Image (cartoon, helix red, strand yellow):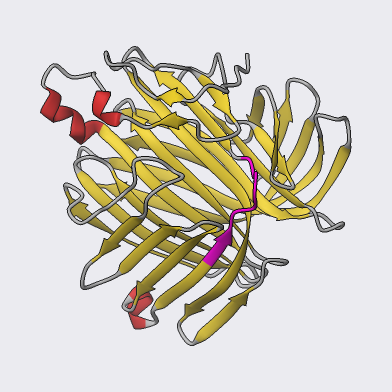
């Protein structure tokens, strides 16, 4: 079921069909979205192609996230932060018609992402050995303001979870998930400044490009943290979208190396999200219980565009087994698991 891709090439053939389907440890495909071919009137295709860069950072104190997205007919910029001790969460976003002013790169390993207007500035830049996140939103949370200058180290040879899958006959999804990037810098929220250190803070990236069905559903779960011996451990699990017969995105990441998993079951009660979630895989290599402590409910209703997300923050407990057979005990690893319904 899990087809690993190792040959570099274009994402799409000249006729718009996927050139390859599967998963990879590196982003080896060129995201040539200009070859997409799913509408008879080519100019209309731009409005259905979706692109986003979603960064998240786990610190000892908080979860911080910033996103630049272009949904084709609108740009979507949002930032949110949550205090682990108090549970205080605040999120703000803006929608920009037709994505005016949004810059997103062709591929995940080159180019910068940017948006700036009178309200906020989001800038995600790539460098030889790190990614830099610059966020400035002075009016955030009634003028408290939020600013961040964060470096996410990109260790030499680090691996990421990359999948390319079809969605129906003509649509597709090309996604890269990076976990456990050591973070340094500062996050200032109101009058409080937190200094991030690589031994205590980790960042991640969800980089997505593709064409989805208008009505979509998915589950996603992720975490980035440390084991007692100092090694980094990351989780990435997903289901509910596209044709996963040749590859899914399920994996755990130990010291920046992918350990690929087969199918994973999300066992939870939709509508009662605070109940513990259970995760098990088909090879008995993963067994985790996720106990939520916070429900981030994010709703958008713009008529023909709707989105409903329950992103649950909580702690993972259980074990995973590496490709080499080592059993890794996971205790109180903070992460999230979500249910997402969208019409977009």
In the rendered image, residue 190 lying in the magenta stretch gets the answer: no
Return the x and y of residue 58 as percentages of the image width and height.
61, 61
Task: Label the magenta part by its dominant secondary structure.
Answer: loop
Magenta span of residues = 151-159
Q: Is residue 47 above or below residue 42?
A: below
- Is 198 on the left-hand or right-hand side of 170? right
Q: Residue at x 40, y 62 (%)?
A: 79
Q: Residue at x 49, y 18 (%)?
A: 21
Which of the two residues, 236 or 42, is positioned nearer the viewer here?
42
- Residue 321 appears in which quarter of the rendering? top right
Residue 155 on the magenta segment = yes
Tell which residue pokes out farthest to the front in this image.
128
Q: Which residue corresponds to the image point at 66% horizontal and 27% vertical from the top-left?
A: 264
Instruction: Give the farthest residue toward the bottom.
Output: 191
Instruction: Tell which of 295 and 136 is nearer to you.
Output: 136
Name the quarter where the N terminus is drawn: top right
| Residue 81 against residue 306 in the figure, above or below | below
Q: How many marks?
A: 0
């Amino acid at each position: 079921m899990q087809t690993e891709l190792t040959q570099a090439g274009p994402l799409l053939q000249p006729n718009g069909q996927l050139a390859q389907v599967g998963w990879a440890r590196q982003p080896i495909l060129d995201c040539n979205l200009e070859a997409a071919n799913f509408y008879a009137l080519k100019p209309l295709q731009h409005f259905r192609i979706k692109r986003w860069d979603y960064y998240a950072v786990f610190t000892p104190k908080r979860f911080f996230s910033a996103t630049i997205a272009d949904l084709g007919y609108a740009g979507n910029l949002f930032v949110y932060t949550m205090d682990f001790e108090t549970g205080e969460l605040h999120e703000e976003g803006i929608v920009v018609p037709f994505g005016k002013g949004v810059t997103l790169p062709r591929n995940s390993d080159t180019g910068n992402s940017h948006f700036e207007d009178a309200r906020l500035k989001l800038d995600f830049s790539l460098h030889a050995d790190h990614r830099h996140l610059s966020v400035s939103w002075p009016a955030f949370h009634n003028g408290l303001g939020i600013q961040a200058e964060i470096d996410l180290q990109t260790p030499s040879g680090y691996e990421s979870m990359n999948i390319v899958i079809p969605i129906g006959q003509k649509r597709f999804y090309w996604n890269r998930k990076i976990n456990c990037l050591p973070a340094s810098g500062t996050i200032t929220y109101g009058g409080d400044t937190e200094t991030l250190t690589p031994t205590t803070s980790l960042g991640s990236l969800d980089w997505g490009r593709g064409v989805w069905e208008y009505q979509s559903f998915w589950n996603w779960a992720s975490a980035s943290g440390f084991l007692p011996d100092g090694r980094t451990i990351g989780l990435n699990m997903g289901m509910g979208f596209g044709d996963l017969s040749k590859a899914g995105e399920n994996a755990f990441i130990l010291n920046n190396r992918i350990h690929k998993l087969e199918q994973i079951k999300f066992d939870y009660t939709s509508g009662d999200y605070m109940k513990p979630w259970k995760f098990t895989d088909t090879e008995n290599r993963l067994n985790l219980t996720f106990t939520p402590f916070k429900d981030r409910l994010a709703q958008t209703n713009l008529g023909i565009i709707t989105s409903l997300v329950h992103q649950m923050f909580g702690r993972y407990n259980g074990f995973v087994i590496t490709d080499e057979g080592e059993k890794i005990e996971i205790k109180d690893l903070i992460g999230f698991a979500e249910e997402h319904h969208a019409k977009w």
